[in-house]
Structure formats: structure tokens, C-alpha cells
Amino acid sequence: MTTRQVRVERFSVTSAKSFEAVVARLEAAVGHPDMHEFRMKVASAKTYAELEKVIHQAIGVSGFMEFTRFDLGEIVRKEQGDQAPQSLRLLIGNPLIMKQMLQPVPDAGSYAPVTILIDGRGDGVHLSYDRMASLLAPYGSAAAMKVARDLDAKVEALLMAVC
């Protein structure tokens, strides 16, 4: 049995824009493939080049696609009504980037795709992201860390752009 301690760095930025505006800007930047169709296309790709084409068709201008979302605020609104804070968790990523981290560090699959948390608070709309480099640091792979740092920079730039 192995236990590994992972120290997480969280990047957060606060926007004065409305929750809806922030979500709309983020949605405009990431791809939204039909996931059932996407999985079928991935499975039917005969070559890596075909797989890359499928993925490039699925990602948005940011280089990421949305895998799924969880409207966390919906649960709270059931109890507190429409006055409850909004909270949305998006899982976004790029399978080609994930592959580059997964090869040297198989445990990277626990962290990809990444989570973006968007939540409304009294001081604005917060966008939060747990840095991949901090999650992979304990594994000691220079190759995975380079990819993770590049990923962190892309995600953080995306979050800054939607603010």
C-alpha cells in the first residue's frame, strides 16, 4: 500500500461581471462536443492522426473542451430558493495534453480533466482552479511537470480572459 501526500495550490480570480456573463464567456471559449458522439469517434479512430483530428474538432478557441458540468448551486437553491449563491463546476481539458502527462505519471489521470469552479459570493464571481503542477509535483517527473506548468498557464489565462 502506498500513500502520497499532495499539496494543492489553488489559483483564484474574482470578477465584477455577473455570474451569467462569466459563464457565457467561458462557454464561448471551450468546445462543447456531444460526448456520446465524441467517444464513438475516439473509439473508431484508426490512427493517432485520426484521433488528433477528432480532438481538434471538439476543442474550442481556448484549446479546451467541456467534458461535463455540475450545477452545485441547484442543490442549494432547492433549500434556500433563488437567493442562494450560484455555483457551477466545469470539467474541461484537452485529451492530447492529458496524454502527455499520463505517459510519465499514470496518476495524472486522477486530475484530468481539470475542474473550474465558478461561484458567486458577496464580493463578486470567483473562478478557481487547482494547479496541475502542484498536483503532479510529488511524482518527480520533469516531463509531466513541464506539461502541467504549460497547462496551468493556459487555464489561468483563460480564467483571466473571462473576467
Image (cartoon, grey):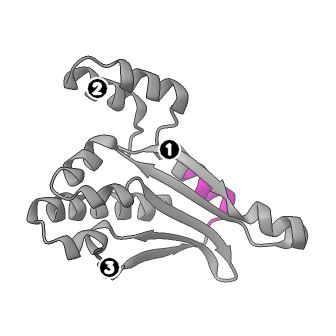
Secondary structure of the residue carrying numbered label 3: loop
Q: Is residue 115 above or below residue 47?
A: below
Q: CA distance from mark 3 to mark 2?
A: 32 Å
Write down the quadrant of residue 135 in the picture: bottom left
Which residue is disc 2 drawn over? 51
Instruction: Report whether residue 94 is seen.
Output: yes
Secondary structure of the residue carrying numbered label 1: strand
Q: CA distance from mark 1 to mark 2?
A: 17 Å
Magenta: predominant secondary structure element? Answer: helix
Q: Is residue 74 above or below residue 85?
A: above
Residue range highlighted in magenta: 17-25
Write down the quadrant of residue 59 in the picture: top left
Q: Which mark is residue 67?
A: 1
- Image coordinates of residue 4 in percent, x first then y, are 29, 78
- Image coordinates of residue 100 in percent, x first then y, are 20, 49
Crowding at dot 3, Cα within 10 Å, few <14 / some 14-19 / many 20+, comes out as: few
Secondary structure of the residue carrying numbered label 2: helix
Q: Which mark is residue 6?
A: 3
Crowding at dot 2, Cα within 10 Å, few <14 / some 14-19 / many 20+, comes out as: some
- Image coordinates of residue 147 in percent, x first then y, are 19, 57
Q: Could you tell me which residue is drawn at 47 percent across and 61 percent down?
A: 115
